[in-house]
Each structure stands twice: as structure tokens, then as C-alpha cells.
Amino acid sequence: MSHPSRPTFDPGLPPRTVARLRARPEKLLPSSAGPPGRPTWRQLALLTATGCTSLSAVALLTPALGTALLALLCLGTTMTVLGLVSLRSSFADDWADLVVHSFWALPVSAAGVLLARVLLEQPLGPLHALVPGDPATAALYLAAAAGGAGAIMRPGMAARLAAEHHDRYALPGDFGRPYSYATRHEEPEAHLLARVQRATDRVEEAARVLGGSFDADHTLPLLREEEWRLSQELLRLRSLRRELVQRTREAVSPQVTKALQPQKEAVERAHRSIDARIGVLTAYGERVHAAVTAHREWEQCQAIADRAGAYADLALSSSRDTMHTEELDDSLLSVEAARSVREELVREAVDAGSSLTETLHRGGKDDTP
């Protein structure tokens, strides 16, 4: 059975964000995981900046806490190193591995912090006369605040973007296992969304291949918006259908099965309604695909015609018989025929796009919650 082949994104997301998330699909979170339970990346950045800045002020004003603050900074650096080890390598599979890694991470972190403090001591030495605390330790905390917040908030961080926008994309895995042998009857929502994605992909391909002769500036955004809307409806419908299947299996009597019949009919009506809406999109996708095929046919015929002269020279140089010019003109006739078909199909695709735009706009106004 066909299955969604790629994630579907909310068209309201910034294009740069969508491009970064498309490039790192392994960072995207399935809908079954729900919203992230840990603090968001922005909250972690705010906590890092606020906490380290506050501790920097304490280090400047309270000399008695200088040693404790330095030890706390070493511990925080160690935890950061262990976090990077667990995220970027396979050497830390569980807590026991992290404990083992701490035996080298703690000395290395402490040595790095102390070395940085020694290097800062000389340029910041004159500040000792102005503040009661330790300027070098305060500077280290300020650097940790800036570095930590900057690292967490960097624009291209796919994990941060995926967590912050977890409810604005749908994954193929949300509609079942992509490589399973589930039939269309078992996973109808996956089949329906795959048809929508195929139509959108064909229009995107036409925009690249046909260029200025095919204007997709109006239809493509509408298709993406409709794809996103349908993905959310299909996810909700899939959840209700699976719940209904489970209740049917657990029914202990015909009376319970009969009570579930209205819900079953509602699910079937929803499938028929969505299937009709998707049929309009797939029909347009077929027209566009035919235009793209005709364009490529014309390009290939044109390439053949461009090489006709070389093959004619080869035939004349290797044969004493007179060449029939009408045979050499066949390729030119093929080019003209392919060009005519291409122009006609592109014109039909453009007209179909205008009709689809009107249909989607009218359908959007007629939809009810």
C-alpha cells in the first residue's frame, strides 16, 4: 500500500525553519510522543543566562563564596561535558556510562576552569581594588552565561526547532509503520495522505521543470495548506477509527456492537468526504504530471533532432546510396508534434490550476468547525 513518504509541515512556519527541519528528519518528534516533557530550549537558555549572571554578581560582591563558586563552576562544566558526550556519541548509553565518563570529565573540566581563571587573573587584576570579590570568577560566569545561552538558542539547531514546533508537523510514522504490509483497509488514512503528497510533489516538480510557462505561485501554497489541513484531520480520524476498532474487538455482545454502529457510520462518512476532497487534488496532480511528461518528451525529441545532422553525415560517409531527406525530417516532425502536445497540456494544467484555486477558496469558505 502507498504510505506518506515525507513529513508534512504547517505552511505557517517560516521557510527557513521548514528547510532546516526537512534537512534533519531524524530530529522530528512523532505525535505519539506528545509535547516535550522537559523545559523548552528557550527556557533553558533563559535559565542559563539568568543563573550564571546572578552568580557572576555574587562572585563580584561576596569574596567568602569565591571557592564555592569556583567549585560549582567546575561541576557545571563537568555536567555540560557529560551532556555533550551523551548527545553526540554512543559511548554513553545509560547512567552507569556517564558515571564512568565523569572520572575523566571532572578533572579535565576542573583543569580547564582553573587555567581559564589564571589567564584572566592578570588582565582583570586592577579590578580587585574596585570590587570586594573575584573578578576572574565573575568573568567566567559571564562567559558561561553568554556561551550557554548562545549555544542553546543558535538559529540552526534542529533539535530546538523540532521541540518548539512539535505540533506543527506530521511524520509518516504518525500514520503507521512506513514499511509495514498493512493494507489500504487497515491504514486508510496513510493511503489518503500519500495521494495528497503525490499531488503536491508533482506540482513542485512542474514548477521546477516547466519554469515560467507554468505558474504555480497560487496553487502550490494552497496545496501545501490543504495537505497540512488534511493531515491533521486524518490523524484525528485515525485515532477515532483505531479506538472504534479496539472497542469492536472487545465487545462482549451483539448489543455492544450495535451501539457502536453509529460511530462506525460516522467514520465511514468522514472517509468518503475526505476521499472526495482528495480526488480533486489528485486529478489536478495527474494533469500536471501529464504536462511534465510532455515537456520532457519534447526535450528528448529536440535533443534527437539536434543530433540528426551528425547521424546523416555518418550515413552519407559510410554508404554510396542516396539518402532520402524525408527520413531525416521525421525527427523534426516529432519535435513539432511533441511541442504542440506539450503546449496544449501545459495550457490545460494552468487552466486546471485556476479552477482548483477557485474550488479550494470556495471550499475553505464553506467549511464548518
Image: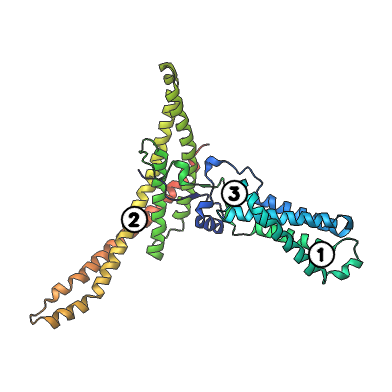
In the rendered image, residue 3, in percent from the top left (x then y), is placed at: 39, 45
Tell me which numbered mark, 1 or 2, is placed earlier along the sequence: 1
Q: Could you tell me how far apart the alpha carbons at marks 2 and 3 are, in whole angstroms? A: 36 Å
Residue 136 bears which disc, if any? Answer: 1
At label 2, the amino acid type is His
Mark 1, secondary structure of its residue: helix
Mark 3, secondary structure of its residue: helix
In the rendered image, residue 196, in percent from the top left (x then y), is placed at: 41, 47
At label 3, the amino acid type is Ala
Is residue 355 visible to the viewer in this orientation of the structure? Answer: no
Please tell me how crowded label 1 is: few (under 14), some (14-19), or many (20+) other residues with Cα within 10 Å: many
Depth check, mark 2 against mark 3: the one in front is: 3
Residue 304 bears which disc, if any? Answer: none
Name which quarter of the figure residue 258 lies in: top left
Q: Tell me: residue 33, above or below residue 266.
A: below
Name which quarter of the figure residue 325 lies in: bottom left
Q: Which residue is mark 3?
A: 163
Q: Could you tell me how far apart the alpha carbons at marks 1 and 3 are, in whole angstroms? A: 36 Å
Q: Residue placed at 38% from the left, 63% from the top? A: 209
Tell me which numbered mark, 2 or 3, is placed earlier along the sequence: 3
* Labels 1 & 3 near each other (Cβ < 8 A): no
- 142 or 298, nearer to the observer: 142
- 183 or 181, nearer to the observer: 181
Q: Could you tell me how far apart the alpha carbons at marks 1 and 2 are, in whole angstroms? A: 66 Å
At label 1, the amino acid type is Ala
Is residue 296 visible to the viewer in this orientation of the structure? Answer: yes
Mark 2, secondary structure of its residue: helix
Q: Which residue is mark 2?
A: 289
Judge left or right: residue 156 versus residue 299.
Answer: right
